[in-house]
Image: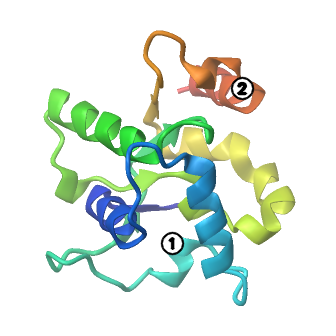
């Protein structure tokens, strides 16, 4: 299973001028446009690309990121940066399994059938609670499904 580097996600947000108000579902629209011709996932398209610091943009996923698409994409990135820092994880050695970048968005109905195995295969799940005092992801059925599957780890 492939994931994207935190650095790549920051660069992606910068390329598309995403600010704190940019919802993750807006990112989904950008990705649908970028992958319209190939119908591939971003990780498939960028498998051999590098970030501006010369490190691979894509690698073996080490963390499954559960998040709500209605929330801020940059805030999700901030939350992941804070998580990595808090747990002493080096961003250069981490690759995030973020659905928008790892699933073929044009074939989502087929891709979703494999989801129950993804979290277990990665073995490390982080749920982004945004906003922290009323997390949207805890009101979303799919995010709750991810929570249930993370209990198998």
Please give left or right for residue 50 compared with residue 97 in the image. left
Residue at the spot x=46%, y=29% of the render?
A: 128
Toward the right, the furthest residue is 109
Rendered residue at 47%/38% (across/down): 123
Residue toward you, 32 or 17: 17
Residue identifier under label 1: 43
Residue name at image x 69 percent, y 88 percent: 38
Residue 143 at x, y percent in the picture = 66, 29
The answer, for residue 152, to whether it is visible in the render is no
Q: Point out which mark residue 55 bears.
A: none
Up the image or down, 119 lies above or below 49; here it is above
- Disc 1 versus disc 2: nearer the observer: 2
Q: Report whether 43 appears left or right of 18.
A: right
In the picture, residue 28 is in which quadrant? Answer: bottom right
Q: Is residue 35 left or right of residue 79?
A: right
Residue depicted at x 32% and y 66%: 14
Return the x and y of residue 5 as percentages of the image width and height: 32, 61
* Residue 112 shows in the view: yes
Q: How is the image coloured?
A: rainbow
With respect to residue 62, does 137 lie above or below?
above
Residue that label 2 marks: 140
Mark 1 surroundings within 10 Å by alpha-carbon count, few (fewer than 14), some (14 through 19), many (20 or more): many
**First along the sequence among labels 1 and 2:** 1
Rendered position, 66 above or below 5: above
Q: Position of residue 58 (x, y in %)?
A: 38, 70
- Percent coordinates x, y for residue 90 in the rendering: 15, 48
Q: Helix, strand or loop at disc 1?
A: helix
How far apart, in angstroms, are the residues tagged by discs 1 and 2? 25 Å
Element type at mark 2: loop
* Residue 109 drawn above or below residue 59: above
Residue that extends furthest to the top in the rendered view of this protein: 133
């Amino acid at each position: 299973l492939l994931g994207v580097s935190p650095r790549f996600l920051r660069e992606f947000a910068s390329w598309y001028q995403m600010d704190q108000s940019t919802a993750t579902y807006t990112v989904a629209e950008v990705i649908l446009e970028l992958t319209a011709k190939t119908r591939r996932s971003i990780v498939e398209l960028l498998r051999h690309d590098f970030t501006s610091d010369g490190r691979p943009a894509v690698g073996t996923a080490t963390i499954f990121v559960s998040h709500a698409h209605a929330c801020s994409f940059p805030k999700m990135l901030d939350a992941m940066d804070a998580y990595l820092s808090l747990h002493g994880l080096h961003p250069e050695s981490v690759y995030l399994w973020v659905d928008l970048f790892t699933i073929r968005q044009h074939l989502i109905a087929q891709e979703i059938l494999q989801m129950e195995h993804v979290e277990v295969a990665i073995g490390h799940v982080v749920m982004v609670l945004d906003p922290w005092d009323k997390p949207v992801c805890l009101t979303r059925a799919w995010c709750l499904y991810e929570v249930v599957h993370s209990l198998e780890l």
